[in-house]
């Protein structure tokens, strides 16, 4: 009986998610709201002039953290010059980051679908349940990424560890693909 209830709840969750994704697919594209900045990491800073003689930092588009890390991994893989053992662990870590980043994308799609809904077809409980389920999925994927990262980190040299740490932070400060 308990298994049946769980199956029914899982089925309802999948139906809600499918409905949310359908709403997102049917919604018109939303124009970008933020300006980008170049990917140049040579020390120059991107500035925007406001016509009054003052310069302010250009606004950066919002990029979810795991998606920013995900975008950094292909070049980091090359720059680390991994051994065969390290490459295997890196690939496992990369796959788990992709799952966690995908969970961020799914949550964003669901929220966008709810915002586009006319408030007649979705119940409040479905909204909160979907958000909670998405957060749970994302947290589980992120925990898996931590486990795989710890295994990878243990076999990296101190110089590789230093580069890994720096590039992870750099991916959050100046995400790839935002220019």
Image (spheres, rainbow, N blue to C red):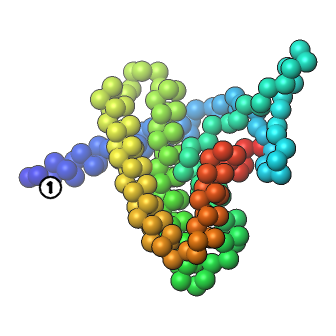
Query: Where residue 109 appears, x then y in whole percent?
Result: 51, 39
Residue 172 shows in the view:
yes
Q: Nearer the viewer, residue 105 or 13?
A: 105
Horizontally, residue 70 falls left or right of residue 124, namely right
Q: Residue at x 37, y 31 (%)?
A: 127
State the count of labels.
Answer: 1
Measured along the vertical axis of the image, is residue 5 above or below residue 35? below
Residue placed farthest to the left in the image?
1
Tell me if 82 is positioned left or right of 121 in this view: right
Q: Which of the pair 32/166 is nearer the observer?
A: 166
Work out which residue is located at the far top of the displayed protein and give it: 52
Q: Residue furthest front?
A: 158
Could you tell me if residue 91 is visible in this image? no
The image position of residue 150, as x and y in percent, is: 45, 67
x and y percentages locating residue 20 in the rendered image? 45, 38
Which residue sits at x=34%, y=43%?
133
SS under mark 1: helix
| Residue at the outermost bottom position | 84
Q: Give x and y (percent) for residue 91.
A: 54, 72
Residue appearing at x 68%, y 77% in the figure: 81
- Relative vertical location of residue 18 with respect to residue 91 in this rendering, above or below: above
- Per the image, the residue denoted by label 1 is 3
User: Dividing the image into 4 quarters, which one contains the C terminus?
Assistant: top right
- Image quadrant assignment for residue 178: top right
Query: Measured along the vertical axis of the image, is residue 151 above or below residue 17?
Result: below
């Amino acid at each position: 009986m308990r298994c049946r209830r769980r199956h029914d709840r899982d089925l309802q969750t999948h139906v809600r998610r499918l409905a949310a994704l359908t709403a997102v697919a049917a919604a018109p594209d939303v124009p970008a709201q933020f300006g980008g900045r170049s990917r140049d990491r040579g020390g120059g800073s991107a500035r925007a002039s406001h016509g009054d003689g003052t310069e302010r930092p250009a606004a950066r588009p919002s990029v979810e953290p795991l998606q920013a890390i995900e975008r950094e991994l292909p070049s980091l893989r090359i720059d680390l010059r991994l051994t065969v053992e390290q490459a295997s662990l890196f690939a496992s870590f990369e796959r788990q980051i992709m799952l966690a980043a995908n969970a961020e994308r799914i949550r964003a799609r669901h929220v966008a679908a709810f915002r586009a809904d006319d408030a007649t077809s979705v119940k409040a409980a479905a909204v909160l349940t979907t958000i909670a389920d998405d957060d749970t999925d994302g947290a589980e994927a992120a925990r898996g990424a931590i486990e795989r990262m710890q295994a990878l980190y243990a076999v990296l040299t101190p110089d590789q560890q230093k580069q890994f740490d720096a590039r992870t932070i750099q991916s959050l400060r100046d995400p790839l693909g935002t220019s």
